[in-house]
Amino acid sequence: MKHFTSVNDVKNAREFVAAAGELKKDTYAFKHLGKNKVLGLIFMNPSLRTRLSTQRAAMNLGLDVMVMNFTGEGWALETREGVIMDGDKPEHIKEAAAVIGQYCDIIGLRSFPGLEDRDRDYDEELLKFFMDHSGKPVISLESATLHPLQSLADMITIEEFKKTRRPKVVLTWAPHPKALPQSVPNSFLEWARKMDYDLTIAHPPGYELHERFTGGLEGVNDQYSAFEAADFIYVKNWSSYRDYGKILSTDRNWMVSLEKLRNTNDARIMHCLPVRRNMVIADDVLDSDASLVIEEAGNRIYAAQIVLKEILT
Ligand code: CP
């Protein structure tokens, strides 16, 4: 594995998820792999789970870690080609990525979308700059369109808790006061399709995701019927892909509450976190045994660790 930016960087998703599960049983078995090697984690946006779980994964493999937040710490970076840099951005991404490559053996990058220019966001400009100019393997810590480490942790969690060979997994939109990226649902669908789960997508009209991620599976607009016999319900807000970056619905009836789980096969509830309580998911779900959000966050360690291990070996 040269880079890790999507499920397509993995030869066999099912085997990779199983390997992460094995790694979890013997966390320090590969501590020698990272000796005298440095992981650099570059954050263009805030983080709790991604930052700490990836650091922990690196420590489990004996890697040293450097973290830099460009949210206020680094120079503001210019990303446009051929411009006269007479504005407020003193450093070009080309030099920044190349310099970071001098200091690190592996680079993790978090770069959210602007949610204004769809083509620009879906072109993954920043991630490509780092892959092209750093000269080092690059791991996505959530890009403009995908969050593969999160999805890998989600798959590890579903495999741990599933009660049937091919569980029914529902991805449902839920309301949120801010416009959020499509990266988590896009990525979740890519991975869940490779795992061959029985997938359903539920969202209000206008929230259809790109076919590249849905694989042509059409979303339903009725959350109640979508939840019927569900084994796992993955809750997430996203902004519209069609009316790019727009909030088209604020319908609170889409919030997931305990009452809605009656129709399910004792479904377990998942969310990548952070989650807005009583907006996206109700207290009665998050505080119940149905919730898997903490287990999911815990598995972020083993998702990052299997990726780092693969790159190191
Ligand atoms: N789920 C997730 O990526 O969390 P953070 O944004 O806190 O890293």
Image: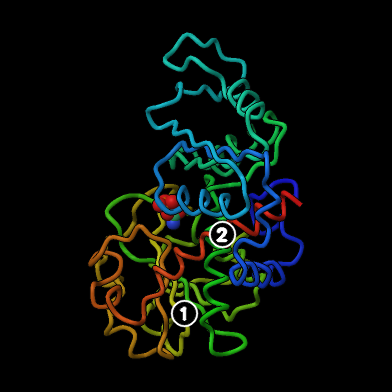
Residue at 72% from the left image edge and 55% from the top image edge: 310
Between residue 38 and residue 74, name the one nearer to us.
Answer: 38
Would residue 223 be found to the left or right of residue 219 on screen? left
Q: How is the image coloured?
A: rainbow
Would residue 113 be found to the left or right of residue 174 on screen? right
Q: Residues within 10 Å of mark 1 (few under 14, many from 20)?
A: many
Circle 1: element type:
strand
Eyeballing the image, is 260 above or below 63? Answer: below
Eyeballing the image, is 78 above or below 33? Answer: above
Residue at 47% from the left image edge and 85% from the top image edge: 231
Between residue 276 and residue 65, name the one nearer to us.
Answer: 65
Between residue 286 and residue 143, name the one nearer to us.
Answer: 286
Kindly identify which numbered label has been placed on residue 187.
2
Residue at 76% from the left image edge and 52% from the top image edge: 313
Q: Does label 2 point to a residue whose CB lies under 8 Å from ligand 1?
A: no
Whether residue 181 appears in this view of the structure is no
Q: Residues within 10 Å of mark 2 (few under 14, many from 20)?
A: many
Would residue 263 be found to the left or right of residue 188 on screen? left
Q: What amino acid type should be assigned to the residue bearing mark 2?
A: Ser
Task: Find residue 96 and report its horizontal and vertical position in percent.
Answer: 58, 23
Between residue 308 and residue 194, name the one nearer to us.
Answer: 308
Task: Find residue 188 and report its horizontal and vertical position in percent.
Answer: 54, 64
Residue identifier under label 1: 232
